[in-house]
Amino acid sequence: MLDQRRPRPGLTNIALTLVVLAGFAMAASSPVLADTDKTVDKSASRNSTKHSQPLSGPEFDTPLTPGETASPENSQTAQPTPDYAFGAYQRGYYLTALQLALPRAETGDPAAQTLIAELYWNGLGVARDRKKAVDWYKFAADAGNRESQFAYANILLRGKLVEADKIAGENFMRKAAQAGHAKAQFNLAQIITAKRPTWAGFKNAFPWYEAAAKAGLPDAQYALANIYSEAKGINFNDDKKARVWMARAAENGFDTAQVEYAIWLINGRGGPVDKTRALYWFQRAAAQGNTIAQNRLSRMYAFGIGTKVDLVRAAAWHVVTRRAGFSDSEMDRTFAALENIDKKRALELANRLVGARGS
């Protein structure tokens, strides 16, 4: 399954207005939110792909979790007996899974066909053969398996393994979305807004964003929060609802949402001010390597916002962000004013912070 804490590679050459809408509202009313210098913010460019491009498929980092790919309940030909092929797949007996699935796949079982496609796509128990996997994805997609429809839609839209076919790709994406596939719902919404990158386009895509968000997809939850908060001239301009969805995306590990939610908590946007809680969400995002969060965290410790003043810890987080290419002249001066012993402690702590995050 795609790791939802990492940037998702998207479809080819799709850039959406949503990335503009998702910019941070960093008002200068607080030293935490005050504008910093121009930066080379690696995390900002990394995170923007999360919501600005459709989710990819089927390039999964690891085998899909139980129930998401070849599980019989996701097939229109659900089996009344246990799915031994999928059971073998779950336990890592991939060659056995292939042997058990093949007879069923050859008789047209889309769940078994999807399982075989996964095995060939990822090279599990067999030599990796993406072209053979594409064939099995197509068989299963034509038979109505929503996971294969999502995978095959992306294959068609990318045009790397087969000739690109955007119309067919969108049709399969829509079928998967209509069947309740959350990532397909989000992708379909992104495709709609890519075609019409206006608020009218977002209005048309809104039901699909909403469906994916309600299914728990943090990308969609974050997109929905931005639509609710930024829409002008349509009935979505509602900071209270936006804050609810921003919180859900943050809770589901989306570091960009964690940063923005923290900023909303400090500003009291869409609800009460809660600086202590904001500190927590900056910490969560900073632990994921989000440079903006790390910078804001250094300022909170430096100015005692949501916590007591801790100049060593503030300097440590500033060192981490400087190493990542983030420039903040005010925090540079804070670091320079420290005693040498405190500078040494800050450097040691910065090394531990990075080491803890990487472990």
Image (tube, grey):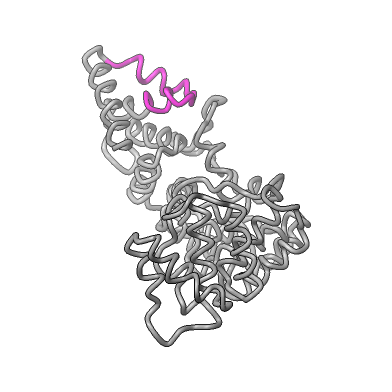
Locate residue 152: give its quadrant: bottom right
Q: How many numbered discs?
A: 0
**Considering the image in quadrants, where does the N terminus appear?**
bottom left
Q: Main secondary structure of the magenta part?
A: helix
317 over 233 or under it: above or below: above
- Residue extending furthest bottom? 80
Locate residue 291: give its quadrant: top left
Q: Give the residue at x 57% y 25%.
A: 38
Between 313 and 74, the one nearer to me in the picture: 74
Locate residue 186: give its quadrant: bottom right
* Residue 78: % across, % down: 49, 83
Q: Give the residue at x 64% y 55%.
A: 230
Q: Give the residue at x 49% y 46%.
A: 256
* Residue 248: % across, % down: 45, 61
Between 28 and 58, the one nearer to me in the picture: 58
**Considering the image in quadrants, where does the C terminus appear?**
top left
Do we see residue 205 in this rendering?
yes
Between 89 and 167, the one nearer to me in the picture: 89
327 over 25 or under it: above or below: above
* Residue 347: % across, % down: 28, 20
Asked if the magenta segment contains residue 116, the reply would be no
Q: Which residues are magenta?
A: 318-338
* Residue 247: % across, % down: 44, 58
117 over 12 or under it: above or below: below
Q: Give the residue at x 66% y 72%.
A: 142
Asked if the magenta segment contains residue 329, the reply would be yes
Do we see residue 15 in this rendering?
no
